[in-house]
Amino acid sequence: MYLCGKIGVMKQLKIYLDTSVISYLDQQDAPERMAETHILWDKIKNGEFKAVISDITLSEINDCTEAKKNILFEYLAQINYELIETTEDTLRVAGQFVYLGILQQRSFDDCQHIAAAIVSECDIIVSWNFKHIVNHKTMMGVKAITALEGFNDVLIYAPSILTGGAQDDT
């Protein structure tokens, strides 16, 4: 998917993948979400999106069972992605989500996912985490923090928004 720039040139969208997206590539108990995630994965493999993950994502994958971890790393090997390392800016922006009451300290990893996407100038955060990331309160918090901190705004979508999934063609 591409976005028109200031002079009409198409720009490849830079999407941040949180751990939930990668995890749903092998989530047998949620076949619809798994199917939508595979459609998105194919779009990434075909170069429709520029994928970004963070060291937080890799850490969370490493916390999975050995079998799940191996499967997820096999999927990651299928795509090109930019790896973002946690920086002081990332931690500062993540802290704003807790300070402003958008998310709680116990969800600090989710704050870091959002902050990594903001600091690395992603266009979209892609997540299946509706409790902490893909919801109105977090979206409004992202708008407030990006405005306060001088960063570009970033959209937050579930994978199905980028794949056109769950649509009825009637």
Image (cartoon, rainbow, N blue to C red):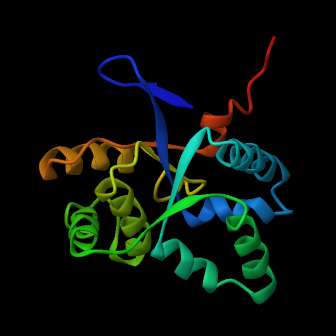
Figure quadrant of the C terminus? top right
Q: Quadrant of residue 80 in the image?
A: bottom right
Residue 47, horizontal then vertical, whole percent: 63, 42
Q: Residue at x 29, y 41 (%)?
A: 153
Residue 135, horizontal then vertical, whole percent: 46, 47
Q: Residue at x 38, y 74 (%)?
A: 85
Please give left or right for residue 6 compared with residue 17 in the image. Answer: left
Residue 113, horizontal then vertical, whole percent: 42, 64
Please give left or right for residue 128 compared with residue 157 in the image. Answer: right
Figure quadrant of the N terminus? top right
Q: Residue at x 23, y 64 (%)?
A: 93
Q: Is residue 164 above or below residue 86?
A: above
User: Which residue appears farthest toward the top when viewing the image?
Assistant: 170
Along the line of sight, which residue is nearer the eye, 47 or 116? 47
Q: Is residue 89 above or below residue 44?
A: below
Q: Is residue 59 above or below residue 96?
A: below
Along the line of sight, which residue is nearer the eye, 100 or 62? 62
Please give left or right for residue 102 compared with residue 9 in the image. Answer: left
Along the line of sight, which residue is nearer the eye, 29 or 156? 156
Q: How many marks?
A: 0
Please give left or right for residue 161 compared with residue 125 in the image. Answer: right
Q: Quadrant of residue 78 in the image?
A: bottom right
Residue 157, horizontal then vertical, whole percent: 52, 42
